[in-house]
Image (spheres, rainbow, N blue to C red):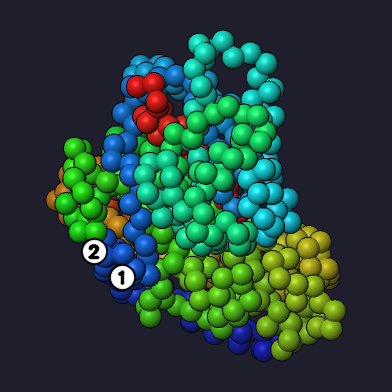
Amino acid sequence: AAVDEAAEKVVAQLREECATPATRLDGVATAMEEEMRAGLHEEGSSKIKMIISYVDNLPNGSEEGLFYALDLGGTNFRVLRVQLAGKDKRVVKHESREVSIPPHLMSGSAAELFGFIASALAKFVADEGHNKVLDGKQRELGFTFSFPVRQSSIASGTLIKWTKAFAVDDAVGEDVVAELQTAMEKQGVDMRVSALINDTVGTLAAGSYNDEDVVIGVILGTGSNAAYVEKANAIPKLEGELPKSGNMVINTEWGNFSSSCLPITEYDQALDKESLNPREQIFEKLISGMYLGDIVRRVLLKIASQSSIFGPIKHTRLKTRLILRTPDISAMHHDETPDLRIVAETLAETLKIKDTSLETRKMVVEICDIVTSRSARLAAAGIVGIIRKIGRGTPGDKRKTVIAIDGGLFEHYAKFRQCLESTLVELLGEEASEFVAVKLTKDGSGLGAALIAAAHSQYL
Ligand code: ADP
Ligand code: MG
């Protein structure tokens, strides 16, 4: 059926409510900067936790040896093995295996989840066959665990809460390294966890290993978060002696940011209410891959309830949560065919909405564009908040500031990436943005864990 007035009204309202003019984004960046400052001041004094990572030196290239990493993100987890050969040769070997996490383990027990991870690691190690490179040394591992953790040292920390699709209740409050170590012992894997890091910290480490101008690491995947290098003397809550380097990597946990400047619609409110973690991770729910598809679905459902263009409402698949995924909206958004064939196919296959008019398909593309642009622009504003916090990105600042970004949303969704990049220029201005760059750091979260494990090896 053709687009009718009721549908047009829903889209017009969405467009208005999701608008992110530069003035609004400027407010978001300012609020982010203020929240960061508050979080550094005192534990529990802000929405964003500003977690001390215990990484006070980023890898400098001199790291050597064979190291492993486990990267537990949101959907998949990766096991990696890297051979590092120092300054000139760097990473001489990099092997990895990706394993998807069975959904039932995301809300089961800690023993089951960590048992599954350890068994995948055991298989990966068993498949090596040989181990002469180790010279009788114990294997060492960096563990990237991409959930909020209160770190107590470089290799220990307790889980504060789960995010994304995880809800393994008995792990909350526990030391995740101890859990992993126990599970590895059960699997007969003799390995030492030398570092526990967040994926943002890993991305920052891997980024700066390849380019010393990298000072910020951002994740735009299933979830979203950022880490950066802070001056140790700008962290009032940091106890004890200041690190020799004078620096400390901070894991912001910006996903939990929220502010009255954020453009929040009825769809966001409903999504939040029905999520596993209501009222938490508001910024993450506006910008990350786990949610964008579902926001679009909610808009389409609203249209279906007020108009007949998507067929009868009664048994519509549009009522099924998370049925429309971010890769689906990305595919539709990038559809270059004259009759929007990919949009038609996606609607037909995932939602069983058939025989859409070209006009309807164009409207669907516009909805994807509104939701994704808001996401990319807000992510850019968050980055600008961090750039300002570290006193960079002003006209006349001739230092290069590079932001390493990892995650499937940034990697695969070209229009998202382009929008984020152009928004950075818009917010920083042409002159200052000459010295600011973003860089895809693929698999940085895993590689970074191996690098940090190397820097904290027991054999140094
Ligand atoms: P994780 O966040 O679990 O570590 P990734 O960084 O691989 O994992 O990101 C996976 C997320 O990236 C998916 O949940 C999805 O939202 C998003 N994504 C993956 N492929 C695409 C795509 N083609 N277009 C847009 N988003 C994608
Ligand atoms: Mg990841």
Q: Is residue 15 above or below residue 148?
A: below
In the image, taking residue 154 as reference, residue 163 lies left or right, namely: right
Q: Which mark is residue 45?
A: 1
Q: Position of residue 427 (x, y in %)?
A: 30, 62
Residue at the spot 45% in from the left edge and 63% down from the top edge: 255
Q: Quadrant of residue 293?
A: bottom right
Q: Is residue 123 visible?
A: yes
Q: Kindly identify which residue carries mark 2.
A: 41
Which kind of residue does numbered mark 2 sit on?
His
Is disc 1 in contact with disc 2, using a CB cutoff of under 8 Å? yes
Q: Is residue 267 above or below residue 362?
A: below
User: Which of the pair 236/392 is nearer the observer?
Assistant: 236
Q: Quadrant of residue 9?
A: bottom right
Q: Position of residue 101 (x, y in %)?
A: 69, 48
User: Which of the pair 258/126 is nearer the observer?
Assistant: 126
Which kind of residue does numbered mark 1 sit on?
Ser
> Rounded to the nearest whole Å, what is the CA distance between mark 1 and mark 2?
7 Å
- Considering every residue shown, the one lying at the far left of the view is 396
